[in-house]
Image (cartoon, rainbow, N blue to C red):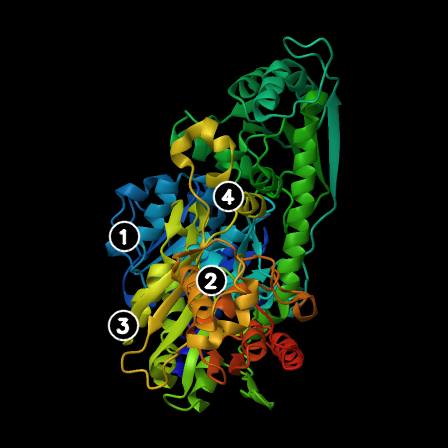
Amino acid sequence: MKYDEFIEGKQRSDNTCGFEVDEVNPMLFDFQKDIVIWALKMGKSAIFADCGLGKTPMQLEWAHKVNLHTGKPVLILAPLAVSRQTIGEGVKFGIDVQKYTDGNCGILISNYEQLHNIDLSLFAGIVLDESSILKSYSGKIRNDIIEKTKDMKFKLACTATPAPNDFMELGNHAEFLNIMTRSQMLSMFFINDTAHTGTWRLKGHAEKKYWKWLTEWAVMIRKPSDLGYEDNGFLLPPIKIHEHIIDAKPLDGELFATVASTLQERQKARRETVSERSKLAADIVNNTDGLFLIWCNLNTESQELKRSIENAVEITGSDTDKHKEDSMTNFSKSKIQRLVTKPKIAGFGMNWQNCHNTIFVGLSDSYEQYYQAVRRTWRFGQKEQVNIHIVISENEGSVLQNIRRKEKDADNMAREMVKNMKDLSSAIIHDHSEDIKKEYQSTVHEDKRFTAILGDSIKEIKTVKENSIHFSIFSPPFSSLFTYSDSEMDMGNSKDDGEFWKHFGYLIPDIYRIMMPGRLVAIHAMNLLATIGHDGYMGVKDFRGDIIRNFQKNGFIYHSEVLIWKDPLLQAVRTKVLSLAHKQISKDASRCAQGLPDYLIIMRKPGENTEPVAKGRGFEKYIGELDEPVAQKTNEARTNKYSHLVWQRYASPVWMDIRQTNTLNTVMAKDNKDERHICPLQLDVIERAVELWTNENDIVFSPFMGIGSEGYSALKQNRRFIGIELKESYYNEAVKNMREAQTIKQTSMF
């Protein structure tokens, strides 16, 4: 693949594998029709449509068209009891849907728990109804769905809440749809927030790219006007939250009542107030006319409520599937007036707009369950004000506060998703978007002893003459660990290690081409930590070894390497890595590990060096720095003595005296969206390498110039320099720094 084709592939991932249709079910609203047409064209896509916007008819029409197109059946996986509701919707829209166990038609439906009994090879396509429910299942079921459907051509995921308070949950959808694995998504768009262990957040430079990436395979809609349609009939009714707080009482072993803080304390407080909360809830329900939906979390709560609420029907986890389905269906038809159950049993998928009174007898810490349970009644199509009652004890105040916080975060996130995806989604659905390609341009700054190039190093290195560079030293992007720009030409913008090395692979052959035979390339690197969230395991990735192997593959000889010592205490404080935490010694010393050092990896181009780097008497200028008196010694003795000391320092495989903070000032070059401070190579490392492996007036080269550290050090030591940098703010600072270096008199580096 040519380099431009590779970059274009990073810029746009065409996931279209479907087919085009001219007409869809006329009973659909216009916005629903256009979404279905788009989803069929995509083949694999997600519909994130708010509750009541018609996900069921849209997915039914999608499945119907896929069945007609392929001549093979389509499977819908849905929460229990939603199956019967979906079959009823099919009748309404003239689409035949039957249960998998007794069906023999084009569209079959089953619940998630029956996946292991289904032969997926029989189906042309699959629909995940309420697809956000995946994260509520064990990893085994979620992974089974992803693994068993990986070769299926047609896929559709439908939910109102793709990620109510966590962007990363969208990775489950992307992986199911074969768009990108969850770990690839993390590499491409997220950064591990070391200030909050285990937390990932969007990279500053990746934010715009992230939303564009989502719209390539998903449409987000909270109301029709988000896509440019009229909102007629799609307005949510008023909602009123009624909080009923039961006075706190001391827990066992306590003299005074306190707010439960830990999970165990909250569970204990919940258990000890079952009677009080159930009695208050029963009084509210019994004194209210019409249908009432009662949510609880504990079996004891469910039993108490069943006994104390008139005409209540209870659904528990141990009930038969038939009882669950019959009860939920009869509540939908208003044949049951009072329904008592848990959010994890009936909180997903059911349409209960016929009920406008809901009560939570206690809350769990799961905002997802709370949100879904509320949206069973508060949805488009609801005609009345929805009343949500929350009965909770004072001891559980932290739970309520936590739900309120998550609710606020989720609402902000939903608004942010719609705001960022609105125009993009609308453009894609209406098929009038075109990628605007920016014409590539580079800039060259020629000075007395240096050349600075603004542009893509892989393109611009072509302008450097063959066999012209005496020495190259640089610090490459560390796979996807650092991302300094939003350009696809930035190697740090890679979805995984494989894509990074493919990108880097376009540069290494040209580094080989421009190097003089027998001369050296010094690459600064470190090994990378593997994490559970990103890599699926905790450990270390051999980035250093990958560099050596990739350079060897392109003809270089592994010459030598230097280990650069770094303070593990500073690493522990900065990175919050658990393997460096002191508490691990007491907890489990087998999980303790050493800090990660830096390496300077030296690769040599084969051939004879026609310009030997002979130091000889060149070291005489440093004689005054010897620790012992040398005034009485002859010039030759003094030179030999110093050469021996210098040799000892350079020959050491470990450089212990590198000052980690001895770097160029980075403040002026840092953009407001840079996730980390620029990490320039330490000047001590550059100066020592340049002094050892080059002669005066040699040309030093860096394909990742950054703010000009390598050029700054080379120019100070009377060498010449050529550097390439992709990011303009860094390039400008590099030019400034190298101009300054030309005015500084060479001084000792020791």
Q: Nearer the viewer, residue 254 or 535?
A: 535
Seen as rendered, the residue at the extreme front is 632
Give the Cα separation between the discs numbered 1 and 2: 36 Å
Disc 1: which residue: 120
Q: Quadrant of the N terminus?
A: bottom left
Give the Cα separation between the discs numbered 3 and 1: 43 Å
Is residue 178 at least partly visible in the picture? no
Q: Nearer the viewer, mark 2 or mark 3?
A: 3
Q: Nearer the viewer, residue 204 or 576?
A: 576
Going from N to C along the chain, the mark reached first, 4 or 2, is 2
Disc 4: which residue: 577
The image position of residue 540, as x and y in percent, is 39, 50
Disc 3: which residue: 553
Give the Cα separation between the discs numbered 4 and 1: 42 Å
Q: In the rendering, which numbered label is found on residue 480?
A: 2
Which residue lies at the image location 59% right of the left edge and 66% below the top edge? 205
Give the Cα separation between the discs numbered 4 and 2: 18 Å
Q: Secondary structure under badge 3?
A: helix
